[in-house]
Image (cartoon, coloured by chain):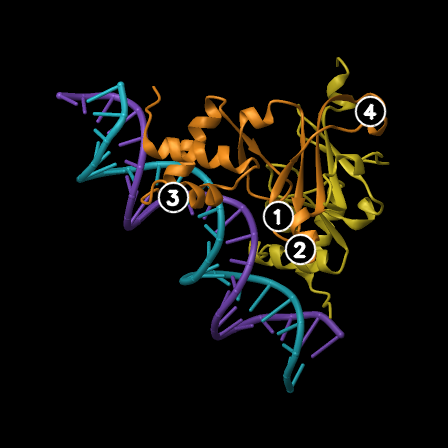
Chain colours: A orange, B yellow, C purple, D cyan
Amino acid sequence: MQRQTQQHRAIRAALDGAGRPLSPQEILDGARQRVRTLNLATVYRTLKRLVAEGAVQPVELPGEPPRYELRSAAERHHHHFRCRRCNSVFDLQGCVEGLKRLVPRGFRLRGHDIVLYGSCAACSSPS
Amino acid sequence: MQRQTQQHRAIRAALDGAGRPLSPQEILDGARQRVRTLNLATVYRTLKRLVAEGAVQPVELPGEPPRYELRSAAERHHHHFRCRRCNSVFDLQGCVEGLKRLVPRGFRLRGHDIVLYGSCAACSSPS
DNA sequence: CTAGTTGCAAAGCATTTGCCTGTGG
DNA sequence: CCACAGGCAAATGCTTTGCAACTAG
């Protein structure tokens, strides 16, 4: 059964407030503003439970540790953009067509991941 | 400068003989048949050099540890297909258009990864 | 109350690095 | 020769786990 602890709430709040996939460390940083004593281990344990119960969705990019986002923000089919400067990951809407063309004869296509790389708005603007 | 050590040769041979992307541990296992004393650290160091000089290409799929393949097998821009049944990874030729449409205003697009999932020819055919 | 949660520290793993020995050219 | 490469072990960095203390219900 799921207890309503302040840590638990702080972690959900951090994910909710971000609006983009966060790493466990980023979640810790965000959630600590509400619960000073929050521990990284607790973040991992809580994430595990949230993922198991479907409230949170892991976002895995090639060659990188997993990030996490609220399921509500990931309800629809979407992909991700990673900024090579600040390393943040952003949700993208929409998708592309023509993926079937890439599949060799005899293969059955069931799903796909698309990750775009570049620099985000903040990092692109000459501040 | 690149020395022609037996370890170096054994690692290249292992990659060459496999014909598919290998994990560092798989490379160690394969190359040890030629050089018994070969060390995992050496595999990592050698891979790093081979990647740096462009002889080897890392293959990173979401949520999985990196694998490595000889560049000759990955010459052109390409993407990957991972079979969810046998877990094999296949090279795909070609690419898709319309990726720019996904990018939010102000973002700069520099590159992308596409991974398709499904079942390969062997796993799709009712054997 | 009391079972589920948390904090802390230690344990795990995969990968990297320091350092001294070995060897290719 | 001798600088680069390799072996070994210790050091990382990220994630998980053991355990005693704590707290939500």
Instruction: Check the image and report above or below for D5 versus A92.
Output: below
Looking at the picture, tell me which residue is in the foreground, D3 or C25: D3
Instruction: Check the image and report above or below for A80 versus B46.
Output: above
Q: Position of residue B100 (x, y in %)?
A: 80, 38
Q: What residue is drawn where x is 73% and y is 65%?
A: B4
Looking at the picture, tell me which residue is in the foreground, B2 or B105: B105
For the residues carrying marks 2 and 3, which lies nearer the camera in this image?
A: 3
Q: CA gap, disc 3 to disc 4?
A: 45 Å
Q: Say which residue label 4 marks.
A: A100
Residue A32: give its label. Answer: 3
Q: Position of residue B8 (x, y in %)?
A: 69, 59
The chain identifier of the residue carrying mark 3 reads A
| Residue A120 appears in the picture as rendered | no
Q: Position of residue D21 (x, y in %)?
A: 18, 39
- Mark 3: amino acid: Arg
Q: Say which residue label 2 marks.
A: B47
Q: State if disc 3 and disc 1 touch (CB < 8 Å).
A: no
Q: What residue is drawn where x is 79% and y is 50%?
A: B71
Q: What residue is drawn where x is 76% and y is 41%?
A: B19
Q: Say which residue label 1 marks.
A: B24
The chain identifier of the residue carrying mark 4 reads A
Q: State if disc 1 and disc 2 touch (CB < 8 Å).
A: yes
